[in-house]
Amino acid sequence: MQHASGAWSPYLVGMLIGLLSMATFYFSNKPLSVSTAYARLAGLVGKLFAKGHTENLKFYQDTKPKIEWGVMLVLGILLGAFIAAVTGGEFTAAWVPALWEQRFGPDVALRLAVAFVGGAILAYGARLAGGCTSGHGISGALQLSVSSWIALVCFFVASVATAHVLYRL
């Protein structure tokens, strides 16, 4: 189960994700995806602070803000990531990873601001693309969806380009 560095083997994890995806299709006829779950969570928060505005948005008229299986999948992903980090010996309580600190310094506020902006861009892109990396990259690719394969290639190209810009590889 463990990789040379102590982390879980990416081959094992890939196989388990594939099995989970197959089981999800078999038992619920739904793909693994989380971008809609994040949008539903945002809608729940929106209803707390601006109920009328949130309910008037077309998206939330079509996609009701509620806790459903996708929201529970997000919670399961967080729990699973925590378990994997602890059992793989990679859990740290550091706010700033060592690689980030070497390149950009130890400023926690900068790290959190960049993470927030990056997350917002990622969420916008997922909504624009009609799905996220798990929806397109796992479920869509397994179904041989052409649009998912195009999205998957774009994810990798953008990731490599971003790494080159940030870390000058």
Image (cartoon, rainbow, N blue to C red):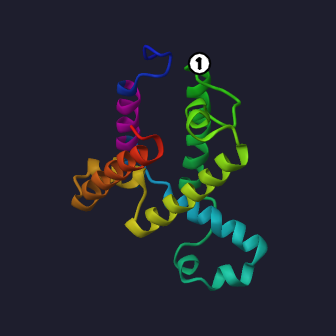
Q: Residue at x 59, y 59 (%)?
A: 117
In the rendered image, residue 119, in percent from the top left (x then y), is placed at 56, 56
Residue 144: percent from left, percent from top: 22, 52
Residue 53 covered by magenta stretch: no
Region of the chain picked out in magenta, as a range: 12-22
Residue 18 drawn in magenta: yes
Query: Residue 93's x, y, as percent?
Result: 71, 30
Instruction: Tell me: residue 110, above or below residue 169.
Output: below
Residue 29 visible to an observer of this rendering? no
Which secondary structure is most common in the magenta stretch? helix
Q: Amino acid at mark 1?
A: Gly
Q: 17 or 28: nearer the eye? A: 17
Query: Which residue has dot 1 on it?
Result: 89
Picture residue at 43% right of the left edge, 13% below the top: 4
Q: Name the residue: 55% across, 41% down.
A: 77
Question: Under tag 1, what secondary structure?
Answer: loop
Please state which of residues 67 and 79 is positioned toward the viewer in this rendering. Answer: 79
Q: Residue at x 64, y 69 (%)?
A: 43
